[in-house]
Image: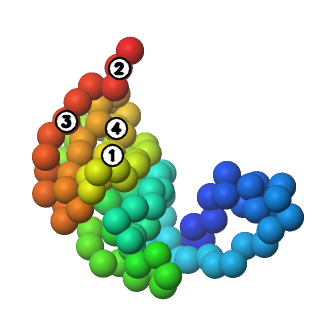
Amino acid sequence: MKKIVPCLFLFAAVSLGQSVILTLDAPDTNISGLALGGGALWACDNVTNRVYKLDASTGSVLLDWYVDASGAHPTGMTFADNKVYVALTSGYVNYYDASGSYLGQFSALC
């Protein structure tokens, strides 16, 4: 399995003279986005269109769901205000509550 070690975090650790303290097995093979919030690590896969809620200490999958994106794929994500925001290749963002219930969609097109 692939390891979740985002380049940005690794670069920050190296540039600050810090070391990596934890690596986790990825829950899927094409992780395209990570977010941290609500006491969990969140990951999305851009091939299987799944979102994963992971235990941030162990990497265990706590919850996962399918992103119905009408042919688009998840490319990134963030967590804010107890919501999971999933950016799609279509230029839209789907958002969900922390239990995976779909709340809506908005355009991120400029």
**Spatial separation of the CA atoms under disc 4 and disc 1:** 6 Å
Q: Position of residue 67 (x, y in %)?
A: 24, 51
Q: Is residue 88 above or below residue 4?
A: above
Quarter where residue 110 is shown = top left
Q: Report the residue marked by disc 3.
A: 105
Q: Report the residue marked by disc 4.
A: 88
- Position of 96 compared to 10: left or right? left
Q: Is mark 2 in CB contact (under 8 Å) with mark 3?
A: no
Residue at image position (39%, 70%) is 40
**Spatial separation of the CA atoms under disc 3 and disc 1:** 9 Å
Q: Position of residue 71 (x, y in %)?
A: 25, 38
**Spatial separation of the CA atoms under disc 2 and disc 3:** 12 Å
Q: Amino acid at mark 2?
A: Leu
Residue at image position (24%, 41%) is 94
| Tag nearer the camera, 2 or 4 | 2
Viewer-nearest residue: 81 or 67:
81
Q: Is mark 1 in CB contact (under 8 Å) with mark 2?
A: no
Q: Report the residue marked by disc 2.
A: 109
Q: Is mark 4 in CB contact (under 8 Å) with mark 1?
A: yes
Quadrant of the snapshot with the N terminus: bottom right
Q: Position of residue 62 (x, y in %)?
A: 30, 78
Q: Position of residue 93 (x, y in %)?
A: 29, 36
N-terminal of the pair, mark 2 or mark 4, is 4
Viewer-nearest residue: 105 or 88:
105
Element type where label 4 sits in the image: strand
Q: Amino acid at mark 3?
A: Gln
**Disc marking residue 48:** none
Q: Is residue 89 above or below residue 30?
A: above
Element type where label 2 sits in the image: loop
Whether residue 66 appears in this view of the structure is no
